[in-house]
Image (tube, rainbow, N blue to C red):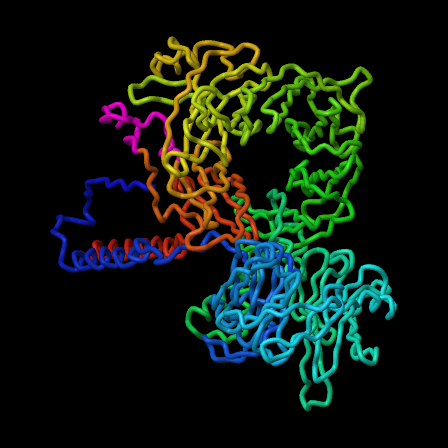
Amino acid sequence: FCSIRVDTMRVSGPRFGRRRPLGLSFAAALFFLLAWCEISTFGVLSIAVDEAGKNDWHREQVGLVHGAQFLPAYADPATNATMRSVAVLTEQAVVAVLNQRTGAIVWRKQLDGAAEVSAVAQSQLVTVSEAGKRVQSWDFRTGAMVWEARAEGTVGDLVTSEDGKLVGAVTDNELVVYDRAGEVQEAVAIAGKAKMGKTVSVEAAGTTFSVGRGSRADLASEFGFANGAATSATYRLDGSDYAAVVGYVDAKLVAMVVDLGTRAIVESQEYALDASERGTPREVFLTGYAKKGGSSAGFRLLLVSSDESLCLVQQGEVVWLREEALASITKTVVVDFPVSSEKVEAGGGLSGQATAQDRLGALVLGLKASLNFATREEVELLAKKKVEPAHFDPNGFNRQVLALTSSGKLFALHTSDGRVVWSKGLAGELRGDHVAMWVYSQDAAHGSPKIAIVSSGGSKANFVIVDGWTGAVLAAREVGTGSSHLVRLQPSGPSALQGALLVDFEASQALALAERPEDLSHFDLGSTFVYSVDDQGGAVSGYRASVPASGLSIGSPLPLTNLWTTNLAPGQTIVASAAPNFFQKVYSRTRVLGDRSALYKYTNPNTLFVAAEGKDSESGEKKLFSYLVDTVTGRMLYSIAHRDASGPCHVVFKENWVVYKYRSERGNRDEVSVLELYEDEPTKNQNSISAHLYDLVTKANQSSEVSSYSPTAIRVLGQSYVLSLPVKAMTVTSSALGITANQVLVATLSDQIYAIDKKLLDPRRPTQKPTNADKEEGLIPYNEFLPIAPQKFVTYTHQVAGLREINCWPTRRESSVVVLAHGTDVFYARMMPSKSFDMLEDDFSYSLLVTTIFGLLVATFVVYSMVQKD
């Protein structure tokens, strides 16, 4: 903001003599000055037509490939250029076609069930899904469905006729032949040899089918490959049968193509793929082509590694590589980059602070590009220079998201564009189930952040500390329990160390997790309470962890004391539970009402919300029961029953409010309920806000602490709404200080994210005509249907395929939060729930501001000189 002050002063003296009226020249100069200012600010008033995608990115994946078919060349419908592609089937129930030259996705489809096998007939790609019951045909050029059919038996394989015109579905007893329209041409019984895995020829529908897959298990050992080598299916080219074997020989990845008729090695190549990062080969798919001149054949290999990456290799070179492990993210955290004076590994080199010469060169390139004088190479160089560097951002916008995948690989994604900054294979240090990943310590100014990862499997668990800037393993320890219940402790110490307890409720003990023994001295375990939820048994129990008399040490168990157990009514099954984040920031514990009174929020972090399905003991109708329980004392704080309601239930709990979604059996729709908890102290709540401020200033020892052992009566306000969007996941935004308005983010069945303002989920929304106090408080009149606004879709028109989870983190700007959603795809966005109240817009023209100020200064001197002449 700026203010302009106009002062009047009286001028006297012999120099000016008699005052004269301003001449025409001054009026003209003033007119041109105002006109120039109006023109110069025109660009500030205009906005971009389409700002979608400015602060977000969408990374499309296909997933872990388990089947592939190389497709015949065809003309691209868009460019009419020759297209060579490969169709893939993945564990994420995706069928997709990839460009052989670049690896880009041409098209993809999300199936209802996992795609199992595929075959190609002319321009059609035929797939089988839903446990061998659904047969579908796709035009592999466009992705349009041609036909689909329900198989009478269970289809275990698909085969193509020798002329390539028909497809046969192999069931337990017969071969069913489909034509191009999906009609069954003939069904032929299969010989016994095909059932035993041997290849046989079957005559059907006027052509021949080769049924069965011959075994090539001995091919790898025959040519000197160790265990872990992958062998391709038989590929026929020019009347000869070939197969590929890929594996590591002397720490080098070797790919051999063998003529199965002569057992001769036709081609052998080495590829620069690191075994420690990629792991052993899982699958390999072979295709061939005639080299120029037709003297010999060439081969391409599609390789799937144990780290779930997918790459195409040919003639000793890796043509392209896709990191498909990102389709199976299990845990995520966000950390800062190092300060600009340091460097981190980024792509193929190092990215640090740009020098003055680099910045000057970028300005020159930008000027040439704006004037259309730049060459193609200079335009590409300018695009590379515009990529956000990997160094510390004081706003907290450019950071790295650490994503741990099910294959045990850790990725660092740059939040500016989603590119992979670095990756690290941790499969050797982790076990099967990933329990948790969190920032153990972070201090970007003095050292790299440390990331803690806990994984469990069997009767043991692994505790690993890695470097947050490189992924290097700093410490790894085996823990003597296979429990998957983890409780994080309060950060403490000079580096804000955050340890954790791995709780084994069956053994009634807990283990403290720390990198070093001296770190244990920073943890306060004097009053640590934990709880367990038995979903099937319908019970909730509370425990207290005690430090043994011998002291706290790494590996020594802490005994658990069972304090209480609450059993729900017989027949009730717990379908959801949630507790507020113990370390959340609560900006204000009061809510000021329109009549100047205040409500005090009940912000006890030891409050647990439990939702359970059951039936009414008298009428037998379905009900969803909601409970609020104190996890320290086991006291039941509140309960309510929703008639004709059931799960699935999704819930978020923040500060003093709970929002949960359930299914209404009566209305056959999703409904959302909100509960807000306040302290029920009439004397305290009825005082005016000025009285509260007076007490805060004049009375000593004012404390905002809440104790479960000295409970206060609570008042619960609630309302229910109808949500027309089917929901499969839910979370809530979180800002740095808790000032920014909250939004509930829901993942829809259409794989999109929708933001619901918390003010729409306010239980104090008036059901009658709003009073003046309601209007002053900004309460929206109650409507049982939550409005759906298209601009509230965080994902815009994107679909995050297979969306499973939404994560939200604060930035250093209170107005901004960041959201990462992952499933098969990965989506990232920066949101401003309360608009940009603490920063300028990203497209603010600083150069125009400087130009305007400079122009005003020049115009001021010009006008002043003209006044002097008059």
Whole-percent x, y for residue 633 in the image: 59, 14
State yes or no: residue 780 in magenta: yes
**Residue drawn at 70 percent across, 81 percent down:** 237
Comparing 589 with 304, the one in front is 304
Whole-percent x, y for residue 402 in the image: 63, 47
Image quadrant where one finds the C terminus:
bottom left
Whole-percent x, y for residue 869 in the image: 20, 57
Whether residue 334 is visible = yes
Quarter where residue 674 is shown: top left
**Residue drawn at 57 percent across, 11 percent down:** 709
- In the drawing, does residue 491 fall left or right of residue 843? right
Image quadrant where one finds the N terminus:
top left
Comparing 476 with 590, the one in front is 476
Comparing 692 with 135, the one in front is 135
Give the magenta-colored segment's residue range: 758-783
Whether residue 354 is visible = no
**Residue drawn at 68 percent across, 68 percent down:** 190
Name the residue at the front extreme.
189
In the image, residue 269 sits, relative to residue 845, either above or below, namely: below
Q: How many marks?
A: 0
Magenta segment's dominant SS is loop
Whole-percent x, y for residue 644 in the image: 41, 30
Comparing 408 with 62, the one in front is 62
Quarter where residue 372 is shown: bottom left
In the image, residue 224 sits, relative to residue 746, either above or below, namely: below
State yes or no: residue 761 in magenta: yes
- In the drawing, does residue 694 fall left or right of residue 483? left
In the image, residue 174 sits, relative to residue 721, either above or below, namely: below
